[in-house]
């Protein structure tokens, strides 16, 4: 298990930060933070849950986030699903901040 | 004569109480028990509020806050970290039922409509204020007001700040900067980007003068009449309950 951090600055100023626990190319756990707006706000927890187990690749990540947006009727301002994916892939490419037993 | 709304404030509370009162009004309005409301308030002591999705450790210098006696609270609304100076910043909150035809369903449109109260209020004071999408008001091209909105339970809550004067060095002590070496640079960059009513007018202004102008601004922008009122007993006791949440570690350090 490796913990990584990623950041993505959206055009227009919003900053998305990701704390990613990666397990063999997949998301083990993830936390997405930043100064964006997402309605309803609680959808962020669903997004994070839905990403658990996802392969760390653009297609699968985007699909899972968009599925939550659809089911929760979510709407975001300042950052969209594509931006979250960029931040996550940024984290994937980051050097680890902490390593631990699997 | 326009629709009658309730006006509350200016009152001053700590950060947890301020956020609890906003949510109490939102919930009670959603239940149809109180009128649409605009509240003006200050933060005593000064405080940092962070957006719903932000992480405390990423945004706030917790040690400096403790040293300076600055409270830290997480908002119900998204957006960025804000330093609310006791003596330099006035906050408003606006609560309206979600079905009200005055408020567009579209978030982006509704920011424009609700922020128009701030724009008109600042213009009354003599500032060259305008709306800057998505959720800012600028004066002389620089940011003077930031705003954030949530919709829950069937009502809309928008709250936002208006800067009377600023203490940028204190602001950058309590908010995290990505790199210590950049602190001075960030202060001067913020000076370029942010302005205050006093800077724009070149004179001192008081809180009552500003809230009075904003009150008229909202009345004009929304076609409403504001009548001075107070929190209901139910709102008060709900706010007391909600204060527990806002001051809890679980809520503040949720992310």
Image (spheres, grey):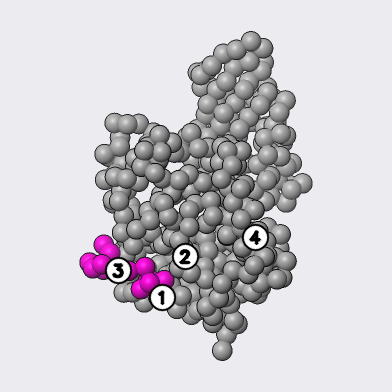
Does B36 appear above or below B173? below
Q: Earlier in the sequence, mark 4 or mark 3?
A: 3
Describe the element under mark 2 as helix, strand or loop: strand
Residue A9 placed where, x, y %?
47, 39
Residue A89, numbered circle = none
Residue occupied by mark 1: B212
Residue B205, numbered circle = 3
Residue occupied by mark 2: B11
Does B180 appear above or below B211? above
| Span of residues in magenta | B198-212
Residue occupied by mark 4: B237
Query: Do callouts 2 and 4 mark residues in contact (Cβ within 8 Å)?
Result: no
Q: Chain of mark 2?
A: B
- Identify the residue at horizontal 53%, vertical 74% (top origin): B7
B172 lies left or right of B77: left
Q: CA distance from mark 4 to mark 3?
A: 34 Å
**Labels 2 and 4 in the same subunit:** yes
- Identify the residue at horizontal 29%, vertical 31% (top origin): B181
Describe the element under mark 3 as helix, strand or loop: loop
Q: Chain of mark 4?
A: B
**Labels 2 and 1 in the same subunit:** yes
Residue sitting nearer the eye, A10 or B23 = B23
Residue located farthest toward the bottom when viewing the structure as drawn: B1
**Can the viewer see residue A39 in this picture?**
no
Residue B237: in magenta span: no
**Labels 1 and 4 in the same subunit:** yes
Q: CA distance from mark 2 to mark 1?
A: 14 Å
């Amino acid at each position: 298990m490796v913990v990584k951090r990623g950041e993505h600055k959206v055009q227009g100023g919003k900053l998305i930060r990701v704390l990613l626990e990666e397990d063999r190319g997949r998301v083990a756990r993830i936390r997405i933070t930043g100064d964006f707006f997402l309605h309803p706000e609680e959808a962020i927890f669903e997004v994070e849950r839905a990403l658990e187990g996802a392969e760390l690749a653009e297609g699968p990540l985007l699909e899972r986030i968009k599925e939550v947006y659809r089911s929760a009727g979510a709407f975001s301002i300042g950052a969209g699903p594509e931006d979250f994916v960029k931040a996550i892939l940024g984290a994937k490419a980051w050097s680890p901040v902490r390593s631990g037993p699997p | 004569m326009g629709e009658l709304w309730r006006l509350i404030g200016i009152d001053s509370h700590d950060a947890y109480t301020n956020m609890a009162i906003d949510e109490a009004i939102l919930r009670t309005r959603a239940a149809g028990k109180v009128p649409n409301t605009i509240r003006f308030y200050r933060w005593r002591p000064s405080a940092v509020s962070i957006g719903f999705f932000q992480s405390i450790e990423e945004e706030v210098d917790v040690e400096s806050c403790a040293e300076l006696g600055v409270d830290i609270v997480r908002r119900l609304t998204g957006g960025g970290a804000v330093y609310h100076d006791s003596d330099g910043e006035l906050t408003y909150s606006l609560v309206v039922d979600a079905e009200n035809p005055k408020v567009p369903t579209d978030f982006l449109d509704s920011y424009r409509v609700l922020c128009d109260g701030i724009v008109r209020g600042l213009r009354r004071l003599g500032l060259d204020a305008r709306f800057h999408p998505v959720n800012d008001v600028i004066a002389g091209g620089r940011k003077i007001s930031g705003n954030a909105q949530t919709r829950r339970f069937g009502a809309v809550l928008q709250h936002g700040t208006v800067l009377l004067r600023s203490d940028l060095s204190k602001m950058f002590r309590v908010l995290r900067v990505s790199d210590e070496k950049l602190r001075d640079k960030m202060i001067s960059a913020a000076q370029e980007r942010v302005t205050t009513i006093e800077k724009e007018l070149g004179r001192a202004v008081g809180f009552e003068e500003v809230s009075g102008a904003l009150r008229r601004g909202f009345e004009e922008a929304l076609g409403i009449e504001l009548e001075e009122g107070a929190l209901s007993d139910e709102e008060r006791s709900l706010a007391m309950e909600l204060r527990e949440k806002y001051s809890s570690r679980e809520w503040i350090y949720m992310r």
